[in-house]
Each structure stands twice: as C-alpha cells, then as structure tokens.
Image: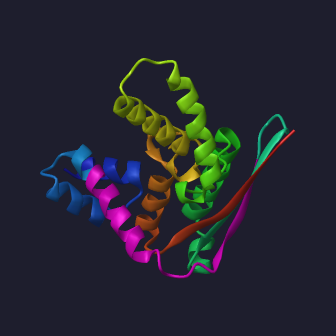
Amino acid sequence: MIEVIKKIRQETGVSLALCKKALEEAGQDAEKAKELLRKWGQELAGKRSGRGTSQGVIEAYIHSNKKIGALVDLRCETDFVAKNKDFQELAHEIALQVAAMNPLYLRAEDIPPQVIEKEKEGYQEQMAKEKKPKEIMDKIIEGKLEKFRKEVCLFSQPYVRDPGMTIQDLINNTIAKMGENINLEKFIRFEI
C-alpha cells in the first residue's frame, strides 16, 4: 500500500495524507484514487475562487527557434506560494501551452457572441450540402461548436504533456496541492 501511495503522490504531487485517504476511499484502486483527488481539487478550487489573488508571477517562454513567445500572468494569494517551485513550474507549463497551442481566449465565456455566430454560420453552410434531418444537423453543429470552444479556450485545451487533462485540471491540481486560490489573469502570444 505504501508503494501505491508513493506512486500516486509522485503522479499528482498531493500530500501523502491525502493520497492515503483517497486510496482508502477508493477501495485501494489507484486510478479511482487519482480521480477522487482530481474531484477534490476541483471542489477546493471552487471554494477558493472568491478569494483575492494579489501575488504571483509573470512567466515568459521563448521557443527554441526564437520566433514564438508567450507571457502569462499567473496569480496566487501569498508571496510564499508565488515563490514556490511548483507554482513557478505551473506558470512555465501554461506559458509553454500558450506558445504551442495558440489559444485565443481564457474561457468559453470570453468568446464574443459574433465569433460563435460566424463559426455557426460556417458550419451551417457546410451542413447545407448534407441530406440529414434538421435536428441531427443541429446536434452536429453544436458538437463542432463545442470542439471549436475547446480548441480556442486555454482552460479547456488538453494539456500538451498529458492530453488526458485540461489546463483547468492542471490549475485545479496545483490549487489542491498549494491550498490556496490560483488565477490565470491573462496571457499573450507572439509569433514572427
């Protein structure tokens, strides 16, 4: 059991006590324990989301070809966490994600309605050639819009190093590990 707890801690970075508790609640199933830890992290992030984030870091990433760069403004509650290696690593990973995946918005709510409408019109034109019932075409279009949102919104993008988790999951895991609110204020990407 100790080896399994160590493995879960290595993979998640969560405290040994929480790993043990999750493993016990999951009936000694490591995968279920990791899923439980992820759920707890999301719950903790929700509880902490109202707390102010006045400290943090600005992280820069420059690609090896010197033609792509990204800056992220990642905030936390205390200077202690801002100086923490895990927090700084999170900022670096998010900057790397921005450089690699070129998101346009932080979250789906940030997409202007006219952008969604334009995408929807484009999909409707594509689907007009199809001979399918309207309700099926509407579902297909909604699926394409959801895929579009996931591609252009940083929080919902699959993490480049682990496509099984999103950037929001990555942030939530760090919130669970640090025990305080973390907020990505903004990002910018440059490309020549």
Above or below, 169 relative to 182: above
- Tell me: 177 left or right of 126: left
Q: Residue at x 21, y 63 (%)?
A: 21
Q: Residue at x 58, y 50 (%)?
A: 154
| Percent x, y of residue 143 | 43, 36
Asked if one can make out residue 15 in the rendered structure from this viewpoint, the answer is no
- Tell me: 119 left or right of 145: right
The mark tally for this picture is: 0
**Is 93 included in the stretch rendered in magenta?**
no
Above or below, 31 relative to 5: above
How was this image coloured? rainbow
- Tell me: 89 left or right of 177: right
Asked if one can make out residue 48 in the rendered structure from this viewpoint, the answer is yes
Range shown magenta: 34-61
Of 92 and 85, nearer the camera is 92
Of 87 and 115, nearer the camera is 115
Q: Residue at x 64, y 78 (%)?
A: 55
In the rendered image, the residue lying farthest to the left is: 27
| Percent x, y of residue 94 | 62, 52
Quadrant in the rendering for residue 19:
bottom left
Of 26 and 136, nearer the camera is 136
Of 128 and 181, nearer the camera is 128
| Percent x, y of residue 192 | 87, 38
Above or below, 41 relative to 181: above
